Amino acid sequence: MRIAILAHEQFPDGAKTAVGVLRYSDHDVVAVLDRERDGERVADHDETLPDAPIVASLSEVDAPIDALLVGISPIGGGFDESWRPDVRAALERGCDVISGLHYFLTEDGEFRDLAEENGCELWDVRRPPDDLGVAEGVADEVEATVVATVGTDCGVGKMTTTLELVAGARERGIDAAFVPTGQTGIVIEGWGYPIDRTVSDFAAGAVEEMILARGNDHDYLFVEGQASVAHPAYSPVSTAILHGSMADELVLCHAAGRERFHGFSQELPPIPEFVDLHESLAASVGGSEVVAGALNTRTIPDDAEAHAAVEAYADELGLPAADPIRQGTGVILDAVL
Amino acid sequence: MRIAILAHEQFPDGAKTAVGVLRYSDHDVVAVLDRERDGERVADHDETLPDAPIVASLSEVDAPIDALLVGISPIGGGFDESWRPDVRAALERGCDVISGLHYFLTEDGEFRDLAEENGCELWDVRRPPDDLGVAEGVADEVEATVVATVGTDCGVGKMTTTLELVAGARERGIDAAFVPTGQTGIVIEGWGYPIDRTVSDFAAGAVEEMILARGNDHDYLFVEGQASVAHPAYSPVSTAILHGSMADELVLCHAAGRERFHGFSQELPPIPEFVDLHESLAASVGGSEVVAGALNTRTIPDDAEAHAAVEAYADELGLPAADPIRQGTGVILDAVL
């Protein structure tokens, strides 16, 4: 798909979805819309991303595109009315619009009418389907080995680790697939259920449904984790993924230096307790083994210090560990495969 | 409130909500509607319940009532069209209608119109409000001691245990309140959020909001648990309650002889592991201690055998335990208070 990505005033640091799609999706990104960076290029900000021009509005995108992606999500997930001309212009050109906002484009009268008139689709990634069901505890019947990332907290690199593991496994010639559970992953994969937006009773069922849909077509499934089973607010999302996926193996993701849950006063439990906790919780669905750790060392500028932090993390876990971005996924994949 | 309870063809064994409301609510139940038991009385079926006549339809209820409660929930939670005349008659008499069905009466055009014309309210107990938020990890700031029931599985007696604990504590002169988390509990209490129907991201927040709303008005809050943190499908509901309530103390509920999760092929973990699992999971929010067990011995007819089962359960737990119905809550309350 040829896409443009809306990221006004936020590219690249405030545009997690935009950057994730640039880095990991198969889509051909024709342009990024950021009216504050008009005339710059993606490569000016991050040389490791596929390059694309940055323009001020959709009307400046001359190349044909299949879809416009809203690649930012302000706090609260609302729709900024200053984006309306871009979405309108996309629909008038016959492009689909993909959004991960809490505000649903499919409930906006103007967008719905324009989409209908122009034969386009509106895809609200964060809207789970109405027909989800209760998990039946059968995800372990698929042929694939199921590997899930789990975490000590939100924002420690579970999505990135999962995507890097898929890429690394494929480089080794393994038939691996990504199972997304959050909005950015869903946009990258073009498919998936947003488990955080799913009714509690059906959250594990939504995960199970994804495993069953893909689990006999690949040798390995890598399931994107969310939050932490110990998280004061989001643990339901994490347990839904753990029990719904019935993962065979787990990779525990953590961020160097993180001592408290982000935005909360509560301290993280000690690292070794996370291993026991996940394995105890998963025992009721056949058991999962934590086989490796992934440490996000982005906050440590010095390479030697970062490597030392990874070593210390591996010691605490008693398992192999690596920073998937700084060191690659080789060590983790050796433990997983 | 003076209420009639609709329980067609299901009273009493298939009418869990009806029986729960009869036994535990402060409402004055004027009649039960069950067209198969027309002319019988509640006391014919269960002498421990407050007595009331059973009639075939609402038109046979002459006494004034404030509300009609739909006290049954068929598999799937749908609305049986044969109940429509009773709901219609209630609204035409100016009565409110309370329902725990998945089918929302507020989305039924006829009922909505009738409610408006007659100045009545439709209360869909299973519909969470739209403005729930994320938990902030602050439920431990309330003055009350928070006690939650937790379980090894669904249907092991968590609601009953919680309600009996509240009643027992009040008999001891303690200012105790019930915090409901499921439809029957909500109807009994006249207030509360259905955590199983809440979006995963907000499920712990909904529990926290209830604790904050009541926690400074009472000395003890008894929080109704749901399912089990080890459950293959419903664990998100259980972790939401555990983390959202930040309970000080837990009472572990179990059903004698239950070896597998009801409706699933998976075996329950050993009882002592449930104690460790709950305490490990709760460590991140300040810690909870499992202080006692409640065993449902309904399936054991013989008293001596039932008592032996309770003793064996207490041994496995290494904690005091009782069947709250058969033996009362004294032993459990001694551990809790």
Image (tube, coloured by chain):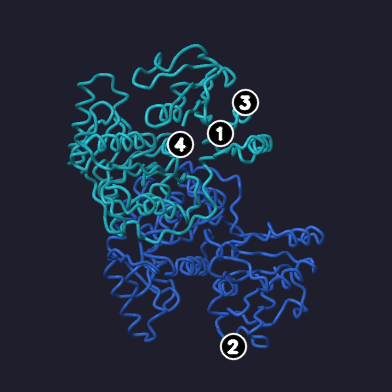
Chain colours: A blue, B cyan
Apparent side of residue B89 relative to residue B225 in the rendered image (left or right): right
Mark 2 lies on residue: A44
Camera-side residue of B16 and B87:
B87
Whether tag 1 and tag 2 are in contact, CB under 8 A, the answer is: no
First along the sequence among labels 1 and 3:
3
Residue A247 visible, this angle? no
Mark 1 lies on residue: B97
Quadrant showing the C terminus of chain A: bottom left
Camera-side residue of A165 and A196:
A196
Residue B187, label in figure: 4
Q: Type of residue at label 2?
A: Asp
Q: Nearer the viewer, mark 4 or mark 3?
A: 3
Tell if the residue under mark 1 belongs to the same chain as the one under mark 4: yes
Camera-side residue of A142 and A269:
A269
> Looking at the picture, does residue A193 appear above or below residue A12?
above
First along the sequence among labels 1 and 4:
1
In space, the residues marked 1 and 4 are separated at their CA atoms by 11 Å
Mark 3 lies on residue: B89
> Looking at the picture, does residue B51 appear above or below residue B229?
above
Whether tag 2 and tag 3 are in contact, CB under 8 A, the answer is: no
Dividing the picture into quadrants, the one containing residue A295 is bottom left
Of all chains, the one bearing label 3 is: B
Of all chains, the one bearing label 4 is: B
Question: Picture coordinates of residue A222 (x, y %)?
Answer: 48, 60
